[in-house]
Amino acid sequence: MTNPIAIGIAGVGKIARDQHLPALAANDGFRLIAGASRNATVDGINNYPSIEAMLKAEPALQAVSLCAPPQVRFAQASAALAAGKHVMLEKPPGASVAEVGVLAELALQNQCTLFASWHSRYAPGVEAARSWLAAQEVTGVHVQWKEDVRRWHPNQDWIWQPGGLGVFDPGINALSIVTRILPRPFFLKAADLLVPANRHNPIAANLDFTDAAGTPIRAEFDWRHGPEELWQIDVTTQGGTLRLSQGGKLLEIDGKTVDVGPEREYPNLYVRFFELIANGTSDVDVRPLQHVADALLLGDRKTVEPFVE
Ligand code: NAP
């Protein structure tokens, strides 16, 4: 058995504590040795105020997992890759599409793995949905990704700032699933972006996509929803209907529940990161981020009432 991969984590906030730390603790392939966060520390490891300080002080580090908001992703990832470390990026992989391509190139030059992770793709129903749809002729798709921003993003200013994506921060999870399960590529035709008068980013968005066959693919993202989340994707095909709900945890085909096993999104992300490192490869799919960028290119911005936390 080989030694576990020495890993560091940067940006110790909500998702690092909720998911990354427990997933790492349960994975024998990794040993968390250091953390980099301006204000937070993790018990039992060495802590540093920045990724640069961590990289300098911890030459034994082999990999880093980046959990800070997307606006600082490139600076952190490029520093880690330049130091020869394998890098896992939380979603979204960058604040722009092009910067992710630059990171992929840097990873190649430095013979490092770059894993642009999309945690929702590891929801238990997703691969089963993809397999079933592979043999179907899709006739329509309806995505509804609606939640209460006050519940899921309390006091997170970065989501409202340039690069923070607004409602596309959760919406991109739906796009990461749809780009995985649909058999054909698709593209945006039109979008409405509902932007609070006092904010930079949309609080809701309605997107109309299609594909080469003209299939209607409609996505509705809304942060003014509640109290129950609605994270659901409905696909109609010539051979029946498919519903992924609860963010991909539940799969129904023609109204019947399919047994897809337990939720293991983040544990499976680290299984995948380990495999990529072992195989000396990278996994960088920018399509979900490209769709968001297209929405921001094509979208008709409509001002709605100010958002007050
Ligand atoms: P967060 O708690 O607001 O931020 C994570 C940590 O990043 C912060 O605690 C902060 O730690 C550090 N940070 C913030 N701004 C920074 C800056 N300008 N420079 C350097 N470090 C900074 O956010 P989060 O909810 O964990 O989300 C982080 C990423 O995970 C996002 O890309 C998000 O889309 C993704 N994600 C979040 C969730 C979720 O449920 N929250 C789920 C899946 C994925 P210090 O102040 O200690 O530096």
Image (cartoon, rainbow, N blue to C red):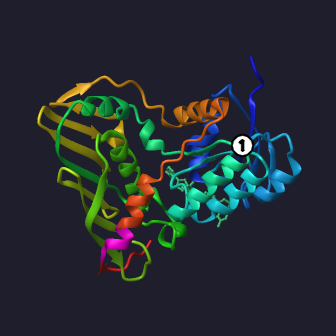
Residue at the spot of label 1: 111
Q: Is residue 168 magenta?
A: no
* Mark 1 CB near ligand 1 (8 Å cut): no
32 and 86: which is toward the camera: 86
Q: Residue at x 21, y 43 (%)?
A: 234
In the image, residue 146 sits, relative to residue 58, either above or below, namely below
Q: Position of residue 50 (x, y in %)?
A: 77, 59
Residue 67 appears in the figure: no
The quarter in which the C terminus is drawn is bottom left
Residue bounds of the magenta highlight: 295-300
Question: For the view shown, which residue lies furthest in the top direction?
Answer: 1
Where is residue 22 drawn, in percent x and y? 61, 36
Quadrant assignment, res 25: top right
Judged from the image, the quadrant occupied by ligand 1 is bottom right
User: Which quarter of the figure is the N terminus placed in?
Assistant: top right
Answer with left or right where residue 215 lies relative to residue 27: left
Q: Can residue 296 be seen at all in this image of the molecule? A: yes
Where is residue 18, by image quadrant?
top right
Q: Amino acid at mark 1?
A: Gln
Q: Circle 1 — which element? A: loop
Tell me which residue sits at (85%, 46%) in the image: 58
Residue 208 in the image: x percent, y percent? 23, 61
Most foreground residue, 155 or 175: 175
What secondary structure prevails in the magenta region? Answer: helix
